[in-house]
Image (cartoon, rainbow, N blue to C red):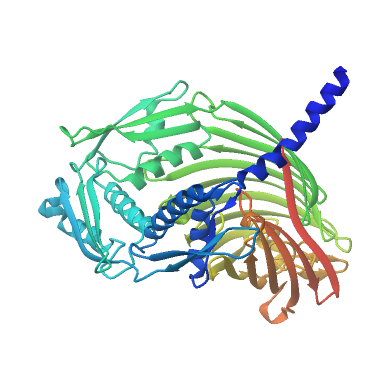
Amino acid sequence: MPFRSLALLLALLLLWPVVSRSQEGTPVAAAGPGLPRPLVKIVETALARYTLAPQADEADEERELRRAERGVREALSTEGYFDPKLRFEPVAQQAGPRYRLIIELGPVTRVGKVELTFSGALTEPRFAERARQLRDAWLLKEGTPFRSAEWEQAKLKLLAATEQRDFADARIVDSNAIVEPATATASLLVELDSGPAYTVGPLQIEGLGRYESSLVERYNPFKPGDPYDRSKMLEFQQALQDTPYFANALATLQTSPEQPELVPLRVVVRESRGKRVSTGVGVETNTGAHVEVSYRQNMLFGKPWVLQSGVRLDQTGGFAYGDILLPPRRNGIQDGVGALVEDSEIEEQRVRRWGLGAARTRTIGPRDGNNTATKLAVNFEHEQRRTPSTDWQSLNVLSTTYGWTRRRVDNIVEPRSGNVIRLEGTVGAGGPSMNQTFVRGYGRVQQYVPVGARDVITVRADLGYVQADSPDIVPSKFLFRTGGTTTVRGYDYESLGVKQGVATVGGRALAVGSAEYVHWLESFGGNWGLAAFVDVGDAADSFSALDFALGTGLGVRYRTPAGPLAVDVAYGARENHVRVHFSIAIAF
């Protein structure tokens, strides 16, 4: 008996959703023909809320029809239709809704008079141009369709634009939309109080333990008395979070309408761990499988100097490095020194080298993809290299390199418009006795062109040349080879260059071009895309010796927080060979 009771209870539980759905009933009405497509879904969504159970009588039906009519009118009013004509027509069939709703929309309501009223410091003569800009940027101009969503968006944008600079306490004190169905117009009234104009004063820092407050001051973009700027404050906050010193940072202005001058900027930080060891394994088509270990220490010799070091081994060889980075100055300049040891073999060329160097970097502009970065580096290195057809060759090199990178893109992680320009120049003395000089120039331009609402075309060009009496005096890293995942797809990593027996070594000239189209799919959450590309390029000992290799193919893209992950299938026309290019890594 207990078993039978349990089985009966289980059967009832399984059948309950079916029974409950049958009792929910069907919608009382469905949308009739003639509606514009964007409005069909809105009306159907509104009607779906009003249903009739199988046992409903005429009173129930009449009540539900009245409720459905009110619901549809409210839904249409959000789209600017405030006086539609609605009527229900009976449907002959037994199954499904009993009525269909015929709608005569009438004219869409349009914006008539717009009155934006400002109060507070924004009305002062010094902010007259700012007030004019806010009025000009108002979204709902006279004559445009009046929709509830755009009405709310216009007010939010007005408030956000006011709060962005000077007026941290801005607020909308009143807003009203008066609709006249007879004329199908809406009169809009918005009253905005900007509050006082704030200037930024000293920092109030909380959460420091290991570090002095001067470390936070180095990242502060404000000088005492600067006007409040929300974007600069968020940039300050993000700059602190991007450092190895802090795991989190929050900056807020301590507003006080009674005292708007030199208002304290409160910064709450949470320090990150002083030491960190991380390991990882991965695989990529350029260098194959790899393992790596890195170590970071945020305090060195009692100062906030960052030690970054690591070791990596892959199928081309391995390297170890150690860098000491000093905290940046207030003007964004950051200095560092480092050392590197490497032993690698790529395309039958074996390279052993060690080097010491110092560098000064600076980034001007925000970190959101619209900035200019410069780097000045001085390096000394000792290199030994050979191929199966040559003996070991040794050289010492002292070089100075200046790099300039300008980013003007809409998104730093996944750009769709804008460009990135990189230029680099090197002057060095090389050879066994460092008595011979060389000059190197390199440039890259990458342009992003949006197509439609989602797609993007990426065009890239690389050009480089080394002026030297002989490539034998130039270290391998300053010579050019190409081919592989991020250069000319369809060819092995750095397999395009100067042939020296069975080996491929670096040349003095480089030219590479690429064009890629990515179509992002609307399905699967919009995170998957299809790509088609053409790459062409070569490296040689002179521009006249270039023999351009062509690579074409198709690929798949998947969006990740760090940027799109790419898997490409490319055909290399020179070698008549198909290769798959991808990279994926797992860190733990």
Residue drawn at 56 percent across, 41 percent down: 337
Instruction: Using residue 4 as the reference point, say whether residue 225 is left or right of it.
Output: left
Say whether residue 267 is visible: yes
Say whether residue 421 is visible: no
Residue extending furthest toward the top? 2
Image quarter hosting the N terminus? top right
Residue extending furthest toward the bottom? 544
Instruction: Using residue 275 as the reference point, say whether residue 345 is left or right of it.
Output: right
Please determine whether, in this image, residue 535 is positioned above or below residue 414: below
Residue 425, horizontal then vertical, whole percent? 54, 63
Residue drawn at 68 percent across, 59 percent down: 557
Please determine whether, in this image, residue 470 is positioned above or below residue 586: below
Q: Nearer the viewer, residue 75 or 350?
A: 75
Residue 94, horizontal then vertical, whole percent? 65, 60
- Looking at the rendered structure, the number of numbered marks drawn on it comes to 0
Residue drawn at 70 percent across, 40 percent down: 19
Q: Nearer the viewer, residue 431 or 38?
A: 38
Image quarter hosting the C terminus? top right
Residue extending furthest toward the left? 125
Residue 547, horizontal then vertical, whole percent? 74, 79
